[in-house]
Image (spheres, helix red, strand yellow):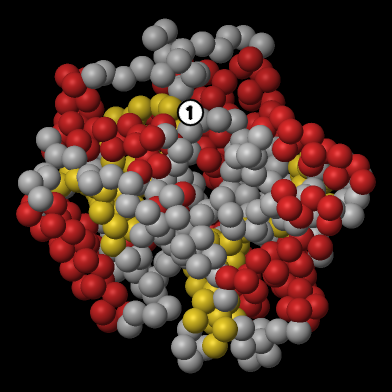
Amino acid sequence: MRSILDMNAFHPEDLDGIEDPAIKTETQRRLRLFGAPAVLFFKQPIEVERGEGSYLITANGERYLDCYNNVACIGHAHPKVAEYVKEQLLKVNTHTRYLNRVVDDYAEKLLDTFPKPLTNIALTCTGTESNDLALRMAMYFTGGKGIIVTDGAYHGNSYLVTMCSPSATKGKTTSEFVKTVPAPDTYRIQKDELAKKFAADIEQKIKEFEAEGIKFAALIIDDIFSSDGVFADPQGFLKPAIDTVHRYGGLYIADEVQPGFGRTGVMWGFMRHGVLPDIVTMGKPMGNGYPMSAAVTRPEITEVLAKSTGYFNTFGGSPAAAAAGTAVLEVLKEDDLIAKAGETGDYLRAGLKALMSEHPCIGDVRGAGLFTGLELVKDRQSKEPDGELTSLIVNRLCHHHVLIGCAGKAGNTLKIRPPLRFDKKDADVFLEAFKLSLNDLGV
């Protein structure tokens, strides 16, 4: 299994192949300062200086269409976010132990987007913190420790969350309290079997925990299975799995860091499946680049947290973060970005499917809203993954000024996840660059 950090990454042994002398010098400096764990994209790293809408612009003025970044969900360098944050920083920016109406107004607006009884919020700084807190709440509330995740999942960087992120540990089992199930592979499993199989796999792992004397606590999943390879449909297939979790006394944690804030054509990805999480976590796009995140849950779960350890975060829920989050919620509504994400995503996927007749390496095109997975295979009959070709295409797309990432255990799925500002003209730019890349490689 390929590590998520290895996918489309620059490797130090490629240093001599960097064509631009200035970029080579900057790359050497980065490696010297950050050491062995340093991670850069692409065989030819790029130096980003600024952003604008769906584009990133380099130090030498070249524009790259960003089809990777869901952090800047309403577009890079959005003026409303900058204005709101600047205005707040010129007033005060402190923690949540003081009353502040900017913070409470934001919390109220965000909670209004969730179904009852999800009425309590904890504000954090990163998706990792949100998931770490959610896992702890699940353990406190259930009295259990057993956690189930999908076998290609990524949920963050803390010690606890890394143990629940097989894609960060190259598939290794890192704790006796974590078990993995196969992701619901909509490309290889019949649709009428998908829901039943996923629920059965989860039930089997719960029973394994019981046999080992470990009480089951929670299932944590990203409901579009972003790192597993992007599996979105059919809508509703998650319900039997969530019913199974609840039947055995566990909690369902919906990791909305990637599918949330309109990415899948609805505000929250779990809404597509008609299920109700016990805890919802969010992060990256929440502040459009300003570091903020949250966990939303039921009052009885936060009450147990309060009795167990309590919770406070110095920077989580600062007024400046709340100002950034407010700007995001306003722009999503004012510019109708969630509905547009659905329309543009359908347009893009239709364009990609039209290429399948000419390019047999395209095995599957799937997704929802502005989240598309394009799986590349060696053969459509065997559906054998082609991670090597995927890496080559990622770098060819960069050559054609399009930035993209990949996902899946074999790293063979292009993960197309642009800012929600991305429109049909941008989709046409991507489709043309993708065609050029396929033709460059003769596939």
Q: In the image, is 340 to the left or to the right of 144?
A: right
* Residue 382 in sight from this viewpoint: yes
* Residue 230 in sight from this viewpoint: no
Vertical side of 376 occupied by 147: above or below:
above
Residue 86 in the image, given as x and y percentages of width and height = 68, 20
Question: How busy is the neighbourhood of tag 1: few (under 14 within 10 Å), some, or many (20 plus)?
Answer: many
Vertical side of 13 occupied by 36: above or below:
above
Along the line of sight, the residue nearer the viewer: 340 or 334: 340
Residue at 56% across, 12% down: 93
Q: In the image, is 68 to the left or to the right of 140?
A: right
The answer to which image quadrant residue 435 occupies is: bottom right
Residue 303 in the image, given as x and y percentages of width and height = 18, 24
- For the C terminus, the image quarter is bottom right
Q: In the image, is 406 to the left or to the right of 236?
A: right
Residue at 76% across, 55% down: 14
The answer to which image quadrant residue 170 occupies is: bottom left
Along the line of sight, the residue nearer the viewer: 41 or 370: 41
Vertical side of 357 occupied by 149: above or below:
above
Q: In the image, is 383 to the left or to the right of 345?
A: left
Residue at 36% across, 17% down: 312
Amino acid type, label 1: Cys
Residue 309 in the image, given as x and y percentages of width and height = 23, 19
Along the line of sight, the residue nearer the viewer: 224 or 139: 139
Residue at 30% across, 49% down: 220
Disc 1: which residue = 125
